[in-house]
Amino acid sequence: MTEFLDIFMFAGLCLAILLGYPVAFTIAGVAVIFAVIGAMTGAFDTGLLGALSQRIFGTMTNTVLIAIPLFVFMGLVLERSRIAEDLLEEMAKLFGSLRGGLGISVVLVGGLLAASTGIVGATVVTMALIALPTMLRNGYDPKLAAGTVCTAGTLGQIIPPSTLLIILSEVMSNAYQQAQFAEGKFTVETISVGQTFAAALIPGLMLVGVYIVYILVRAYFQPSVAPAMDQELLGKTSASRVASVLVPPVALIIAVLGSILGGVATPTEAAAVGAVGALLLAGFRLSNGHSNMLLAASVAALLLVIFLASSTTIRLQKNDLTAMDWTLAAVSSALLAVGVSGLIQSVMRMWRAKLLAPVMTNTLSISAMIFATIIGASVFSLIFRGLGGDVRIEELISAMPGGEVGALLFVMALIFALGFFMDFVEISVILLPIVGPTLLMMGFDPIWLSVMIAINLQTSFLTPPFGFSLFYLRGAAPPEITTGMIYKGVLPYILLQIVGMGLVWSFPTIATWLPSMLF
């Protein structure tokens, strides 16, 4: 029986997670129990635990993972400051007069929120509270409305900057290095967060386009399920109003993603830019008629600082300082003072609106959950490998009929099934370090594989009966929306997700072209 301890360990983890106990403690607890059993039966070498402290220290000091709390903070600030409501209202005025126009607005706003928040739970709940009642009031079929809102909310999984993509890039980079070492290569290549973001951008936008086409086709053949809205009820909008609502979040998205994809900033630096930008946007949104002159000056000052930092070197530690050096330093200091003043004003407005405390608390809890899960998974992975689980998985994948294609189909099916009852963090940090090296040794492109896995995990978020997005929507949906309606509503979108995966599988350049151009 001792030779099957690794199998019992994995099965025990799946059962334990279903009990509802906090996942991070469940993963670590199951690992410790089986480490004790393995040590008592002679199947596990306790000397391996000596590497545990180094693993935990490496996780907590990983410069890539430090970006996660900053992106979480950015998303929560944008979500709590009700920028999404303004976006949806203006989009509805633009497209609502078309059949299915309100559904298109929901998808587009979901894509924008995904690119600015990257938090699936927050996006689904926000869209459910704002968009779902509006769609029902305007005669939309409840199943189509629920499915559209739920699916649009999960775009935060695949459209960067996404927490999933950050974790996925780190895990796949480590797996890629392991695969190269196993092949005898000691000058190894890695993949970066920027490459993963670039790879996921076009597939994510492609999914947005697929959803929109589906809604238009469905509304054309079944006008009663997605009727056009009454233009008088919608009200009129103007180009200036649309620009004032749309330009700021789009500019923030471009600043964050553009700095990463352009190689100007690391993901952590870009996340800091996003957090600062979100605070300033919230300050504008919460002005309540007060002057925004300081905030506007703050934005201009910070942009000038970024320009100066990218175009020249400002260092006062040199021995041969010139008058120009002192002038640049003084100007930069003054600009930073103006920028910080604007940030303080934004923070105070959030504090008076009673938004700052919940944003900070939720950022702490979400970040702690993610890092605790990663640490617990590190413990699990170490002990699972000590019990020989990695060798068994490698043999199982290699023995799959159909060669490389069969192996990949098996792994994708396994990820999809685990997505029913495990979060993307657990799947990414538990399963992928085990199966990733084997798949990469078979010759699959790590960037392409990362995108395929990301779309797969997004699909599992929608799949009944345990899809996480379904639970988020169920908790925020009006009483007239039943669980059965939600399940039926997401089924067409699950098929569209599979179509999306099929397109990326058949045409790998959808995922690999942009990274190859930029990097």
Image (cartoon, rainbow, N blue to C red):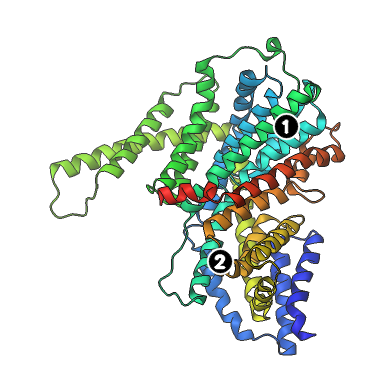
Q: How many numbered circles are shown?
A: 2
**Figure check: 30 above or below 489:** below
Residue type, label 1: Leu
Identified at 74% across, 88% down, the residue is 40
Identified at 47% across, 52% down, the residue is 195
Secondary structure under tag 2 reads: helix
In three-dimensional space, the C-alpha distance between marks 1 and 2, rounded to whole angstroms, equals 42 Å
Disc 1: which residue: 129
Q: Position of residue 235 (x, y in %)?
A: 65, 12
Judging depth in this view, the residue of 10 and 211 nearest the camera is 211
Q: Is residue 376 visible?
A: no
Identified at 86% across, 37% down, the residue is 482
Q: Position of residue 484 (x, y in %)?
A: 87, 40
Q: Around disc 2, counting alpha carbons within 10 Å, would you say few (fewer than 14), some (14 to 19), or many (20 or more)? A: many
Judged from this view, the residue extending furthest toward the bottom is 42
Q: Around disc 1, counting alpha carbons within 10 Å, would you say few (fewer than 14), some (14 to 19), or many (20 or more)? A: some
Secondary structure under tag 1 reads: helix
| Disc on res. 440 | 2
Q: Position of residue 442 (x, y in %)?
A: 57, 68
Quarter of the image with the N terminus is bottom right
